[in-house]
Image (cartoon, helix red, strand yellow):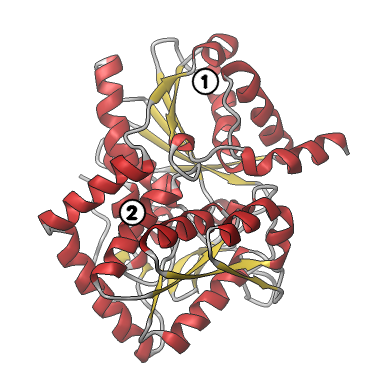
Amino acid sequence: MVEMSQEKGFFGEFGGSFVPNELQNVLSILDEEFEKAKNDPSFIEEFKFYLKEFVGRENPLTYARRLTEKLGGAKIYLKREDLNHTGAHKINNVIGQILLAKRMGVRRIIAETGAGQHGVATATACAMFGIDCTIYMGEEDTKRQALNVFRMELLGAKVIPVSKGQGRLKDAVDEALNDLVENYETTFYLLGSAVGPHPFPSMVKHFQSVISEESKRQIIEKEGRLPDVVIAAIGGGSNAIGAFAHYIDELNVRLIGVEPEQAASLTKGVPAVLHGFKCLTLLDEKGEPAKTYSIAAGLDYPGIGPEHSYLKTSERAEYVTVTNEEVLDAFQELSKTEGIIPALESAHAVAYAMKLAPTMSSDSIIIINISGRGDKDVEQVFHMLKD
């Protein structure tokens, strides 16, 4: 058993809630409502209903035969979050949180988004339930992910470009939190990653843990045992914590998170408070959150989820980096060998698996979490390869 929480909302020294008193009151109510909902059989039944009938779960654990044969070494399985409605893992958490918001009687939803997948998922669920939706997105990301901006607007959401700072994910989170502080009496912040003040990291993990709940059962059905390694890309940490959750106490299973080389919060970060919680954070020479860059907009964040920070410092999980060139190679390789075009975020996990698999024996097993599909990235990759 891996013991992580010294007190509620903390994972070792990481996590907590460092916010104004007015907002803390709102978060305390949210925490209470979440605790009641997650143990309520009717809420659990409703969540499972929408995961099946709207999201399309459960999704497959696909054996990547041709990639395995080409690389040699470990057998590679792909957890197919790319097959979810809206094309990524984000919808799992969105369904859970929007059902909680509906239960609380909230009629206005706000969210942040980097690559646009969380924004699209939020806009989709809000459209289904008829709830007002506002999405904050860094201005730079609106350019990189123009198609997702159109999708959000098509679904009825109001997309607000954020030009402050670098105009990226961190800045979108800043503006969403400012909105929440100003409008907390009427607004539910549907946070998309396993970051932020308590209870957000625990909520996101809870709703995303369906990924590892399924993959654990599926790999036992297929191979008769647990995997040797689970690999996931990591930016804020939602798909990775979902992919890891049911394996954390399985100490013989290696957990590996893969970061962009130029946004390596876990590899190079130091403990600091960011967006109302303590985590490993990249800081500049002034002690401010550092500027980051990733070709995958969803990984472009200077901090990381508090549980990942603990898993890193406690050495339960490993965190590594890959280069942009390795990511682009992996993006193309998975497309050509398996007929699966991954999101650039997911291609980070594929890139590291391509290096690791050949070093392992043929009776070893790797699960890669394919957190999303690459439709949103094809035009961007086209121009990068062309240039």
Residue 8, x across and y down, in percent: 24, 69
Residue 286, x across and y down, in percent: 68, 77
**Residue 330 vertical position relative to residue 359 in the rendered view, above or below:** below
- Label 2: which residue? 205
Residue 238 located left or right of residue 10: right
Q: Amino acid at mark 1?
A: Ala
Residue 180 located left or right of residue 356: left
- Label 1: which residue? 357
Cα–Cα span, label 1 and label 2: 27 Å
Q: Quadrant of residue 243?
A: top left
Between 298 and 121, the one nearer to me in the picture: 121
Judged from the image, the secondary structure of the residue bearing numbered disc 1 is helix
- Crowd class of label 2 (few under 14; some 14 to 19; many from 20; radius 10 Å): many
Residue 369 disc label: none
**Residue at position x 46%, y 59% in the image:** 122
- Crowd class of label 1 (few under 14; some 14 to 19; many from 20; radius 10 Å): many
**Residue at position x 54%, y 27% in the image:** 353
Residue 322 located left or right of residue 309: right
